[in-house]
Structures are given as structure tokens and as C-alpha cells.
Image (cartoon, rainbow, N blue to C red):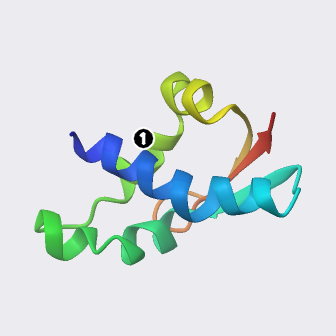
Amino acid sequence: MSLADDIRKYVCNQYINPARTQKQKQVTISVCKVHDEMGLKQRCGGQRYQAVSGALRTNKFETLQRVHFIKSVGTPPNEYLTFELL
């Protein structure tokens, strides 16, 4: 599994699924928080904020998780991505 797939799976389990369970219509994800929670600095030997942002801003993520990208605020590492849950 690629790093991007690991990131998408993590976000699904930690953010998307809980938001669906709570009947939320949108979820906002902090790139920095996902990066830190996954330990990507230690795991990959450097800062991988762009990898987090890039993995989530793909058609693959939207299709697999049944979400629609709404907006991005800020730039990595201080980027927040908002998705509509379909």
C-alpha cells in the first residue's frame, strides 16, 4: 500500500466514518493534525504535509469515500480541507 493509500485509509477511519455516524453533512480535516497523528515525520524521515494534502485532494479519495471537496483554507502545514459527505 502506498503512503497516499495509508493516508486516505487513516482519514476514512478517523474522520469520515465518525462524521457519518454522527450524521454530519460536512467534515473539516487539518492537514497538520493528520500528519502528526500518523507520525509521518518519524515514519518518512521528513515533513510530509504535501503528501497528506495531495492524498485527500484526489478524485480517488472523493469516489472511494463518497465525499465532495468543498474548500481549502490555508496552505500546508496549516491547511484545512472541507468535504461534503454524500
Query: For residue 27, which quarter of the picture?
Result: bottom right
Residue at figure coordinates x 77%, y 53% from the top left: 20
Q: Position of residue 60 (x, y in %)?
A: 49, 25
In the displayed structure image, the side of residue 48 where residue 68 appears, left or right: right
| Residue lying farthest to the left in this orientation | 45
Q: Nearer the viewer, residue 28 or 78?
A: 28
Quarter where residue 37 is shown: bottom left
Image location (x, y in percent) of residue 62: 61, 30
User: Where 65 falls versus 45 (above or below)?
Assistant: above
User: On the image, numbered disc 1 is attached to which residue?
Assistant: 55
Query: In the rendering, at what x and y percent does residue 80 appear?
Result: 64, 60
Q: Residue farthest to the front?
A: 21
Question: Nearest the camera: 75 or 49?
Answer: 49
The residue depicted at 37 percent of the width and 59 percent of the height is 49
Residue kind at label 1, given as amino acid type? Ala
Disc 1 packing (10 Å; few <14; some 14–19; many ≥20) = some
| Left-right relation of 41 to 54 | left
Q: Residue placed at 32% from the left, 49% from the top?
A: 6
Q: Which type of secondary structure does the marked residue at label 1 adopt?
A: helix
Residue 14 left/right relative to 1? right
Residue 66 versus residue 17 in the image, above or below: above
Q: Is residue 57 above or below residue 33?
A: above
As drawn, 70 above or below 6: above
